[in-house]
Amino acid sequence: MTTSLVVQTSFIGDTVLTTPLLVQLANRGPVDVVTTPASAALLANHPAVRRVIVYDKRGADSGIGGLVRLVRRLREASYDVAFLAQGSTRSALLVLLAGIPSRVGFSTSGGAWLYNKRVAYRDDLHHAARLLQLSRPNGREATPEELRPTLHPGEAERRAVDELLRAGGAAPGDALIALAPGSVWGTKRWPYYPQLASALGTTAHIVVVGGIEDGGLAAEIMGAAPGTIDATGRLTLLASAELLRRCAVLVTNDSAPEHLASAVDTPTVALFGPTVPDFGFGPLAARAAVLGLDDLPCRPCDRHGPERCPLGHHRCMRDLPPELVAERVRALLSNQDRVA
């Protein structure tokens, strides 16, 4: 039996995409995860995780003092192997100082010089598949079933969603369409969610998901589609996954809600502007549509998406019409096969 430690202190979506790796490692023995405060609650109830270790690297655990405290804690657990799903030098130093004998990470990572096993970073794979490769010395690629991320909302999350929907006027069994208009990257935000909500508002209850910082975007949507339910900033991440599980379809930018929906297998329409799915972060739900302007010569312009368009026109999002998005939503609602 092998006791594994996984270090994943990147974005929320990266934590979701690490869950296939956690599931595979759990077949070999106990798995603990070092992650951020924001991501830690996502892994609650997950059967593949023995313990979540919160590392607030930009807050309470910042600096050398926080690193040393966590090193001491990890040393007590006597891990056999560490998997560096987040590849900074700080993370590599953490597991080295913790005395973990086997340290596995990508050969392209900043901390790779501190690993004793380096795995090729495959640009041709989805990121969930790349992460899964860390635990596969034979290089076998994942099947679709192995690749699907997983989250496990519990009773508290179900109650929170029940209350939110009831307060918003949605009865049990009503059709729900989720919209996720936000992103931490400015150029990833598609500007036509209000128009889309207006077009779809007679089809189902519209629910806006996101963080408290997305409240202004939700207000715009509510103005265009009265009766819209605003869930921004009102649910935990795990409860948001439960809400998405109940939705007939999600429309989202290239951002964390896309990955939450993949983990609960909600049909998804993902809108890509400055980034492209070939970077490895497309939807993994069984039924999904990816929309973007493939013939735009300036696209992609960035691995993440800058705050402002480098050329000043933001055509990658502004030229993606709401009518096309609504058409794809209706195709998923009508239970048609997966669309490209």
Image (spheres, rainbow, N blue to C red):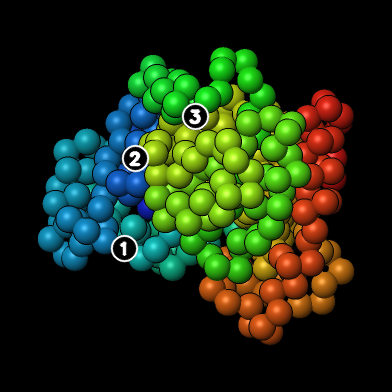
Q: Which residue is mark 2?
A: 40
- Amino acid carrying mark 1 in the image: Arg
Q: Position of residue 129 (x, y in %)?
A: 63, 44
Q: State whether residue 74 is above or below residue 105.
A: above
Q: Nearer the viewer, mark 3 or mark 1?
A: 3
Helix, strand or loop at mark 2: helix
Cα–Cα span, label 1 and label 2 = 19 Å
Q: Residue at x 34, y 58 (%)?
A: 91
Neighbour tally class for label 1: few under 14, some 14-19, many 20 plus, Cα within 10 Å:
some
- The mark that comes first in sequence, 1 or 2, is 2
Q: Quadrant of residue 182?
A: bottom right
Q: Quadrant of residue 116?
A: bottom left
Q: In the rendered structure, find residue 168 and report the number of the disc placed on it.
A: 3
Q: Which residue is mark 1?
A: 90
Q: Is residue 320 left or right of residue 336?
A: left
- Amino acid carrying mark 3 in the image: Gly
